[in-house]
Image (tube, rainbow, N blue to C red):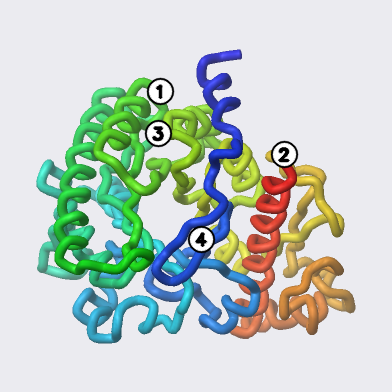
Amino acid sequence: MTTLDSAAQQARRTEDAPRSLTLPHGDLALPAYLPDATLGVVRAVDSDDLLAIGTPALVMNAFHLMQRPGSSTVQALGGLHRMAGWPRPIITDSGGFQAYSLIAQNAKFGSINNNGITLRPEGSDRKLLLTPEKAVQLQLSYDTDVVICLDECTHVDAPEETQRAAVERTIQWARRCRDEFDRLMAQKRLAEGQRPLLFGVIQGGGYPELRRRCAEALLEVGFDGFGFGGWPLDKQNRLLTEIIGYTRALVPARYPMHALGVGHPANVVACADLGYNLFDSAMPTRDARHARLYVFISERPMLSADARGWFDYVYIGDDKYIKADGPISPWCDCPCCARYSLGYLHHLFKIGDGLFNRLATLHNLRFMARLTALLRAGADDQ
């Protein structure tokens, strides 16, 4: 067994793992999958839809929201919860990954230095400067429940020199985020239970020693939880299980850890088995809009990191569903399965009606809510 394998084994769920997070807008049972509402909305559905299928919380993105609709607009509309009509917790990502992706795509879109991230949005003459301090200020002004520190993201295959520089910058930025967060919390004088949490992000690419350096430095600074930073998949879209498990093992089990960007059902199960507690991704909703629907293959599936044997896909655009009179899944209790047939969904998809996007999205998100409920039940049985 390699060192990474051994560390991953040690990272599996323990009795010390948190069962829930107490947040300003309610308790969040763990593990939990959170749909991406990047710009303040989960596409095709509204808050009542999400509440009806048991969605526990949402992830929104400060980097995108500061551009559209703009921070002053979010504040004028009463913060993210009031603007989106969402009463449950919201986690806001600082946007380090999104900024990195944009700049990596084309250097004309911005640059990164020790002060922060300078962005030049396409079609705009103005520059946006996102510093660690501003990232915290924005998220707190949005009335978020969990603030995520600004970090410098890298590609997992980037050379060691690039990874090392990103780790040192991420650590510096995390200290600045911590200082700014504490300063603003002292000003606000919030009562117990009303204070949002602050998460640091562990970078280091595929280099174990850099992941350790980053994790130990962030633990010394002190945070309420941590995220796995960087793209979690290899070039073949396979989960980077070894480094993900190793990173979890670097952080005491009592701290919640967010597997940022993980949303494939099998990958959620794999990361939960490694000790991760929070998951988010646009994959389930994007798959829904593209007619790829998730189904358990039995009423009481035995979950495993291997996708075979416990869930499958229904490709609703296939001709075999034209006259299919049954639901997507006989074991699903979502509004779509309770009322509509496969044949009707096939018809909606083929004519391009917006109702298909809503029903398909509700189905896939209900699948994810049920999946994490099964993971919680399994953890309780251990």
Q: Is residue 297 left or right of residue 133?
A: right
Residues at marks 4 and 2, CA–CA distance in whole angstroms? 21 Å
Q: Which residue is mark 2?
A: 306
Q: Which residue is mark 3?
A: 156
Crowding around mark 3 (Cα neighbors within 10 Å: few <14, some 14 to 19, many 20+) is: many
Q: Which residue is mark 4?
A: 282
Residues at marks 1 and 4, CA–CA distance in whole angstroms? 28 Å
Are the residues tagged 1 and 4 within 8 Å (C-beta)?
no
- Residue 173 pos. (x, y %): 19, 44
User: Residue sitting at 37 percent across and 60 percent down?
Assistant: 146
Q: Number of callouts in the render? A: 4
User: Where 313 falls versus 363 (above or below)?
Assistant: above
User: Where 264 falls versus 194 (above or below)?
Assistant: above
Q: Which mark is residue 74?
A: none
Residues at marks 3 and 1, CA–CA distance in whole angstroms? 12 Å
User: Residue sitting at 75 percent across and 81 percent down?
Assistant: 347
- Residue 82 pos. (x, y %): 37, 83
Of the residues shown, which amino acid type is indicated by label 2? Asp
Q: Which residue is mark 1?
A: 208
User: Between disc 1 and disc 4, whose residue precedes?
Assistant: 1
